[in-house]
Amino acid sequence: MRLENKLFKGKTLAILSGGGDTPAINSGIEAIRNRASLLGFKVYGILQGWKGLLGDGNVVDLTNQPYDGYYGGTALRSSRTNPFPSKKNPESRVPQVLRNFERYKIDVLVTIGGDDTNGAAKRLFETEGIPVIGFPKTIDNDLRTRTIHHYQGKDIEAVLCPGFPSAARSIMEFTASLKTTAESHSRIIVMEVMGRDAGWLTGTATFGGATLGLVPEYPITRERKEVFFETVKETYMNSRKKCLIIPVSEGIRWYDEKTGKVDVVYASSELDEYGHPRFGGVSGIIASEISARLGIDSRAQISGYYPRSGHCRHYDRRLTTTLADKVVDLLLREEYGQMPVMKKIVPYVELEEFNTTSIDMGAVGNKPLSDDYYDISRFSFTDAYRDFLTNILEKPEFSEFRYDFPVVLPE
């Protein structure tokens, strides 16, 4: 039987992006928009995340408009607005969201975000019946996607989120660049990497030439701190060029000699609407203590927003389009309250819809780095983690100055 009209003609699908930006959000927006349009939806963009559904609303029409999915960040802008009551904003703004849903005649909402943005969407689905589909994104790669990594006969629960592959390549390249200045001065460079609660991104520095690393999953207690310094000294002295890059997550818990406590380092005590403070500065503390304790010239380098920035890399581009294909499946079956994910960790060529599934948005949560991926005794990432990363980055990329000059002795 021939259909006279597209399946969803007369319906409107809206897209919003919330929380921290990634290089892959625009790619996700473009892919979802294109597929929704083919199904007959009119496609709107909600500006500034949930903030765009407050007040009178802030909405743009994406239907039949050019859209650059390779450009990083989000053209729909973002915010950390929480429509539900929080400590920072005790007022419930859900009635404003519901009102704008009706005013703009939105039938389905796709929320591109992490645990906070998609958690709010799931709550609206459960309490208000708003048809929502979540779409994952985070450079931290700590959103529980229940993706399985098959390694040497073992199934390891890993994570694969759009945004992480692009950020991982940036950290790999950034580390490889830092190696040249570390070598020139025989220094240790402590490189701070984003990661509030998980060390997935920090580990990608190993593909740029880093050896040791510190992650939030394993606090540096007083006892472990002593072992860490010993390991740093041993690794430095055994390095051929007497230099090290040590990546550390911004959210690591570090023992403070003055307070006797193990805690994170805060860049600001101010909380966002989801109750998160801003971390930053632990790399400077660690570098300073290495210099003082070991007498080795050390410097701190904060990668900051660099991994969030720039264009969408190839793996991310393929990943977002693959997950957008799964969104089509969810729309056709009107299966809301779900989030598309990869079933398993696969190389670039296997990023296909048949390797996807969907999970209930209420079961997302956060996923720390697996114990299989980190050697707590050596402060280093394991072969299993390197195999996981090889699927995404293919192989380590860093150059070496390979000459050994003969030593000249006076006659």
Image: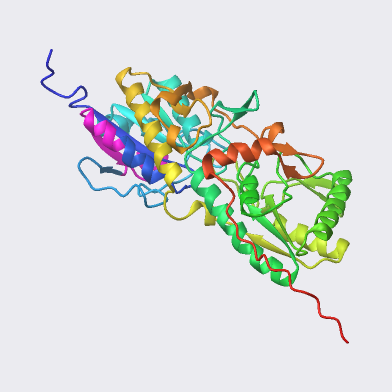
Colour scheme: rainbow
Relative to 388, say whether 298 is above or below.
below
Quadrant of the snapshot with the C terminus: bottom right
Left or right side of 361 for 35: left
Q: Where is residue 264 in the image (x, y as percent from the top left)?
A: 72, 48
Does the magenta portion include 57? Answer: yes
Relative to 361, say whether 299 is above or below.
below
Residue located 47% across and 47% down the image: 22
Residue located 53% across and 37% down the image: 90
Q: Where is residue 391 in the image (x, y as percent from the top left)?
A: 54, 38
Does the magenta portion include 162? Answer: no
Which of these two is toward me, 402 or 41?
A: 402
Residue located 86% across and 66% down the image: 295
Q: Position of residue 309 (x, y in %)?
A: 47, 55
Residue located 71% across and 39% down the image: 382
Relative to 191, say whether 337 is above or below.
above
Report the residue that reaches farthest toward the bottom: 411
Quadrant of the snapshot with the N terminus: top left
Which of these two is toward me, 187 or 118?
A: 187
Which contiguous range is marked in magenta? 33-58
Tell me where residue 33 sits by quadrant: top left
Q: Position of residue 315 (x, y in %)?
A: 45, 42
Left or right side of 60 for 182: right
